[in-house]
Image (spheres, rainbow, N blue to C red):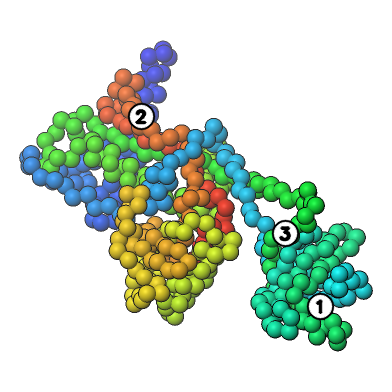
Amino acid sequence: MGLTTITSSIIKNYLIMENTATVIAGTAGGNHVTDGPLTVSAVREASPELLLNEIDSRIVKVRPMATPIDQISRMVGARRAKSMIVDYYSVDTKPCSTTFTEGATDTGKTFDNYRILSVKTANDRIFSPTETLLVPALPGYDGNKVSGSLVLYVVSGASDSTPGLQVIVLNPDPSEMEENRLPEIKEGIEVVRMGRAASELDVQTPQFEALPVKSRNFCQIFKAQVENSTYVKLSAKETGWTFSDQEEVAIMDMRMGMEKNFLFGVKTRLTDPVKNDEVLFTGGIWNQAGGEETVSLADFSQDTVVDIMRAAFTGTAAGSPRKILVAGSGLVQTINKLDYNKVVAATETVTRWGIDFNELRSKFGSLYVIHSEIFDQCGHENDGLVIDPQYLTKYSHVPFTVEHLDLKKSGVRNTDALVVTEASCLVLRHPKSHLRILGR
């Protein structure tokens, strides 16, 4: 068998295998052609009245909800990744508080008329010598008068051989010394780490260093392909439906798929059993968020909004004073039913990153609220995700590119073909700055 015959056989088999276009129904009554080029026969099947006389009219493109996460990540700007596997680092903050695990004990030592006490906490290692500690639940004294909360000074920190801290009470109750009583430090009482207090001759202080925490995500290769046969291009149509219109719809569908992966995807890798090639899947930011708040939609009130604001903007979640709440229709509907006052205000529409948000303001910060149809489609209609855009980063190994394929010269098909490709992933730096909201 000659080379020409073999080549013709291969092309013939390839064409038989590939030209199996399938017409499927869209979400709003339209039809889509998948797994094959757009041919005249496929157009006749999907839209019988499209290839008719020329009419000067515009076709109405019914699209699902926009893709806010993908949009924001593109507007903020992507970082170029030199590999499909992205390693990134986040620096956490040192814990600022813990609780006592038992009552104080007297070491029998005194200094400058101050008693040195021994206390144990659930996390002794966060405290260093010369630091001051605040005990908000216990009163401090200025003479015989209550003044503020109890303040301690750390004389020596915990070690492997001597657990616990040795501290001095800076504003004790005078009667405790007279009656030989100890401060009412008990198990479960909170203690807050404050600043250090150095002496006049101190040149050095206990060291403090922070090391970043390494995390990893995979870039996923997203693709969309549009084809248009030469005869479809030459045929008169009832409306001005061109190759550019097909490209626009294909890119929109591609972005909708990317949005779902960016939100709810699972980070993993496997070898495709058919193609025998490795495929990487990106991890979604829903599981990357470090905070979580569960709310009852049946008992949802303005107080619930305040609680969400507090969880999103205080403690380890503190970051930008303006964050984004992307939510499903159930949660957005519940928020919209509330009557707001001067404590929590629902202000006018705010446009950021090319998206229109409704802004919720409180004393804690502002939330830009937007409904995402992706949450509804993925079973999270009652849930939401608070994102700090300052710590949302996109990595692109292959930026968004459009490539024209010359299938005519290669002898594959008589079509105009276009392939859209992007290999990218999203990561949340400082996970505690982001909050999952679970509606129940």
Amino acid type, callout 1? Gly
Query: Which residue is at a point 42% across and 44% down the rendered structure image?
Result: 76
Task: Give the alpha-carbon distance from disc 2 to disc 1, as whole Å.
Answer: 71 Å
Depth check, mark 2 against mark 1: the one in front is 1
Q: Position of residue 166 (x, y in %)?
A: 84, 67
Q: Where does residue 184 sit, x and y in percent of width and height?
A: 77, 81
> Can residue 283 be seen from the camera position used here?
no
Q: Residues within 10 Å of mark 1 (few under 14, many from 20)?
A: some
Q: Mark on residue 196? A: 3
Measured as percent of width and height from the top left, residue 314 is found at 54, 65
- Distance between the Cα atoms at labels 3 and 1? 24 Å
The answer, for residue 217, to whether it is visible in the render is yes
- Residue 389 versus residue 418 in the image, above or below: below
Q: Name the residue that disc number 1 marks.
A: 103
Q: At 86% across and 64% down in the image, what residue appears?
A: 163
Q: What kind of residue is marked 3?
A: Arg
Q: Residue most toward the right?
A: 108
Q: Residues within 10 Å of mark 3 (few under 14, many from 20)?
A: some
Q: What residue is shown with label 2? A: 403
Whichever of labels 2 and 3 marks the residue nearer the N terminus, that label is 3
State left or right for residue 305 relative to residue 237: right
Which residue appears farthest toward the top when viewing the image? 2
Q: In this view, does 157 lie above or below 266?
A: below
As shown in the figure, which amino acid type bears the numbered disc 2?
Glu
